[in-house]
Amino acid sequence: MKVVCTLDDLSSHTGGCLVPTMGALHEGHASLIDRGVRAGMPVVVSIFVNPTQFGPAEDFDRYPRTLEADLEICERHGAEAAWTPSVEDLYPDGAEAARAAANHLRLPPVATTPRLEDGCRAGHFAGVAQVVSRLFDLARPALSVFGEKDFQQLRLIEELVETDRRGERRWPHLRILRGDTVREADGLAMSSRNRYLSPDDRSRAVGISKALQTAHAAQQPATAENLMAQTLEAHGLEVEYAVVRDPANLMPVDDLRGPTRALIAARLGEVRLIDNAPLPAWP
Ligand code: PAF
């Protein structure tokens, strides 16, 4: 496997499958790499902790950086290259200028109206859209894989690519693949931030996947939302949102007759965790 550190070296790895990451790789990321490999594409994994998607009070400085272990995972899962761009490669005018520019990006409604991550993390999706667009511009992938664990992010990227196809056509042949959420044995969705949890909080964190399961029994959105909130609180989790939404636009639904998605954000002290799952449709 090649470790690509410059844009010159990247030029011999364009056109395949890009798996964008911020490093601190775990089995969830590994399954995204597997997905690209199964699609028969040479896989490039980008590893870049993107400053423009972190708010001033968020964990940019202490975000885990585990490059050696990340490279091993990439190699073990058959990536052709791991690409570790510098800030200058992605943002030639520097991170501060990029942060300012991100504020002027036009985002699709799915990233600005549902009041989910967009309501809790001001500026986050502008930074995500900015860095992912830049990664696509430079790596020019035919395929890119994003996990369902960050469901609103996934929908944002799908909409960005769709909007681009109808307009600018910077990436007209790019296809986005969805990667399943990978869970620990007790149901906790894998996340780079799980490593921040104390042993006590780690045992409480299972309340999130339990809450998603309790929602399956409900026949009305409001009932599902109440059941989820109760389960989260019973595990000592502080609820930011626990809602049932339309899986396309992420807006509220009136009933559970069509496709729906339950989405949760909850806190254990300083650690913020998110998860989501589809709900069964009731006749
Ligand atoms: O999901 C992530 O790890 C990041 O938001 C992404 C897509 C790599 C952009 O920095």
Image: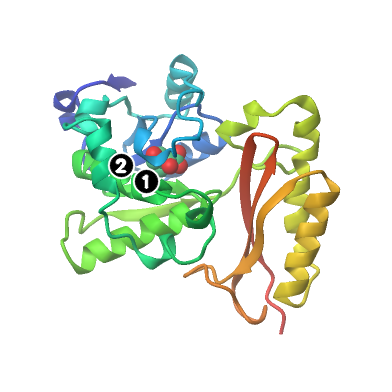
* Kind of residue at disc 1: Val
Q: Are marks 1 and 2 in contact (CB under 8 Å)?
A: yes
Label annotation for residue 131: 2
| Percent of width and height locating residue 249 | 47, 70
- Please indicate whether residue 76 sits to the left or right of residue 260 in the image: left
Q: Quadrant of the N terminus?
A: top left
Numbered tag placed on residue 277 in the rendering: none
Q: Position of residue 120 (x, y in %)?
A: 53, 52
**Residue at the (37%, 59%) spot, across then down:** 158
Instruction: Tell me how far mark 1 sits from mark 2, CA to CA.
Output: 5 Å
Locate the C terminus by quadrant.
Answer: bottom right
Split into quadrants, the picture shows ligand 1 in the one at: top left
Relative horizontal placement of residue 152, taking residue 18 as reference (left or right): right
Q: Secondary structure at mark 1?
A: helix
Q: Is residue 103 above or below residue 43?
A: below
The percent coordinates of residue 222 (x first, y second) are: 73, 73
Q: Quadrant of residue 161?
A: bottom left
In the image, the residue with mark 1 has its CB under 8 Å from the nearest atom of ligand 1: yes
> Three-letter amino acid code at disc 2?
Val
Question: Which residue is disc 1 drawn over?
Answer: 128
Q: Residue at x 18, y 66 (%)?
A: 167
State the residue at coordinates (40%, 50%): 125
